[in-house]
Image: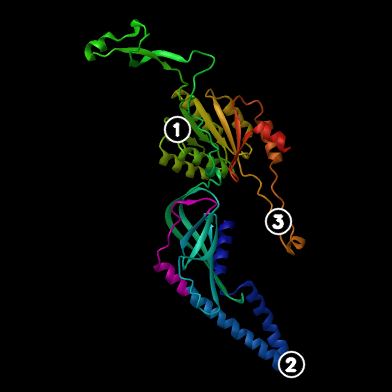
Amino acid sequence: MLKRLLNWSWTAAGWVPLSPLGLICLVASIPVMRYLALGSQDLVLQSLCSGFLVVLALVMVLVSLRTLALLQQLHRGSEALPQGAEAERPYWLPTPAPLWSWFPFVQVNWRWLEPDAAVRLVRRDGFDQEEIVMARRGYYHHVVREFVVSDLLGLARLRFRRKQLGEFRVIPGVGKLNQQPLLVRWSSGEDISDPRGNPDGDRVDLRQYARGDSPRTILWKVFARTRRLMVRVPERALAPRPKVCAYLVTGPRDEAAAAVCRVLLEGDMLGPEWRFGCDGTDGQDHQKYAAMERLCRSADSRTPQPSQVSAYLRQAEQDGYSQGIVVLPLDLAGQEVAVRDALIASRVPLQLCLAIDGQPAPVAEVGWRRWLVRPPVAEKLGDDLRRAAGLWRGFPGPILLIDRRNGAMLGDLQVFARRSA
């Protein structure tokens, strides 16, 4: 109830055509006008206060007129949606209404409240456009914008919200994962035979008879039908291609893990027979488009669900899948032990992939700024990596570490954690 009252109060305050600065100046000018200017017959103060009140009334009228025109433009205009946008990458949309840069002393700005996105108005290809950077993947049903119409002096302001209905999805940003062939085809079979065994298999291949072949390998029925001498030869023994299932464990900071899953799906790196599942959605998919839809919808779940991954792996074992790939972030929202126990209990051989966003390279300031601007403190991943190394120590399968920011496969988790200590 209190939250609804606060929201209603905030919305009602937005329709008052005064900014906090304008309200303070108006309240301060009234006693100055009454007690100093009129009381002491100070003509200078009277002129200043009267001029300020006239300017304040003028900008309030201009802001109100621009707001009415903007509401009419939004009602008539057709607003576009970011179809096919990628998280953490800019996407350009036509402005929902003309900016009217020629309108005197008034400016129009807006921001996105839902979904979370950074918005910047730019001039591109000769048109005014809004540049949006979506913070997170997802499947969304509406966009809520907050418009602010204000004057250049900051004295008058009107604020209102507009909700635009429409479905669109935002796919995870891959960073630099797609710029280098770093992800191996975990599902592929081997190209050579096992060196510890016989490289020959059963005699199922055929070739034409050559001098020195044993008469016992000749196919006499084929010779009677085609008048050609054919013999059986052993096939080359190669490792079979396994059936692979993949699963995404979600978390508060799982965009890098989702990006790895996107690369696996779009690059056909899971082999011909695969399936994909993730937290927050029931079931699994074996078609690329449906799997991408499931990947986007997983953004609604920010807490890992060990029961879901356990049920998924049990079903994969019953369906004959011989290998599993589990992609997960470092932050598991307090469910680290439960997720680890669920994965260790799986009878399907698993390969873990921990996806991170590495530390950005510090930007050196030049000129006088290097003496006045303190460089930002880079995020340290050493503690998180050491905790993750201690958590997954003793896991029976391999654990790879992939950095989405620079597209590097950092190798085994335990080795990298010791090196970064």
The residue at 46%/71% (across/down) is 70
Amino acid on which the number 3 mark rests in the picture: Ala
From this view, report whether residue 143 is shown above or below residue 252.
below
> What secondary structure is marked by label 3?
loop
Image height check: is 84 above or below 251? below
Separation of marks 1 and 3 at Cα, in angstroms: 46 Å
Mark 2, Cα crowd under 10 Å, few <14 / some 14-19 / many 20+, is few
Name the spot of residue 19 as percent of width and height, x first.
Answer: 61, 73
Q: Is 17 or 211 nearer to us in this picture?
A: 211
User: From which residue to which does the magenta span run?
Assistant: 68-89
- Residue at (55% x, 43% y) in the render: 177
Q: Is residue 30 left or right of residue 64?
A: right
Q: Which mark is residue 364?
A: 3
Closest to the observer, 87 or 177: 177
Q: Which is closer to the viewer, label 2 or label 3?
A: 3
Outermost residue, right side:
371
- Residue type highlighted by circle 2: Ser
- Amino acid type at circle 1 is Arg
Circle 2 SS class:
loop
Neighbourhood count class around disc 3 (C-alpha, 10 Å): few under 14, some 14–19, many 20 upward: few
Image vertical order of residue 65 relative to residue 146, above or below: below
Please give the residue where the numbered disc 2 appears in the rendered image.
40
- Figure coloring: rainbow
For the N terminus, give its image quadrant: bottom right
